[in-house]
Amino acid sequence: MLTIKDVSIKKFFSKDFALFVLCGGVGTLTNVVCSGLFSSFHHPILSYGLGYGVSLAVTYSLNAKWIFQQKRTWTSFAKFVVSYLPNFLILFTFVSVLIGVFGWNRFVVYVLAGCLGLPLTFILVKVFAFGHHL
């Protein structure tokens, strides 16, 4: 069971977290580019979901290789995807509201969405997907 002590601020100033942010940046860039391309043919919200899917595959590969030095398997990819579900649900809602309700620029919203949820996602990926301790 995770405690508040386990989730201290210094855990987020580690080399692993810095690499996670870098991998997330590549994933965010992948998502922004793919979402933008897909939105030329599809609704912006569907495009974001498709871009997010592509970025998950890219981000998983980078995390497995650079941060956790683990062989890529379908099982760990499935756990990785599950680890990202809370992040996806929060961000998908964010995108839906800011684009669908408020009419914000889709590229601005895609970039903002990519910057949210890092600490929670890092913990879930590290502990659940790759089986590392905090």
Image (cartoon, rainbow, N blue to C red):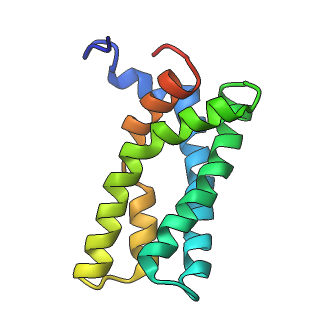
Decide: is 47 above or below 15: below
Whether 61 is drawn above or below 102: the answer is above
- The structure residue drawn at horizontal position 55% and vertical position 18%, both measured from the top left corner, is 131
Depicted 27 relative to depicted 47: above or below: above
Residue 102 occupies quadrant = bottom left
Left or right, residue 124 beside residue 22: left
Residue depicted at 58% across the width and 37% down the height? 78
Q: Where's the C terminus, which quadrant?
A: top left
Residue drawn at x 45%, y 67% as measured from the top left? 111
Residue 66 placement: quadrant = top right
Locate the N terminus and report the quarter of the image it occupies: top left
Q: Position of residue 12 (x, y in %)?
A: 43, 29
Rendering coords of residue 76 (x, y %): 63, 30
Residue at figure coordinates x 73%, y 24% from the top left: 70
The foreground one among 87 and 74 is 74
Locate residue 83, reporting x and y percent. Answer: 46, 36
Figure check: 29 above or below 34 = above
In the picture provided, is 113 more to the left or to the right than 56? left
Q: Give the farthest residue toward the bottom.
A: 40
The percent position of residue 71, horizontal first and vertical second, equals 77, 27
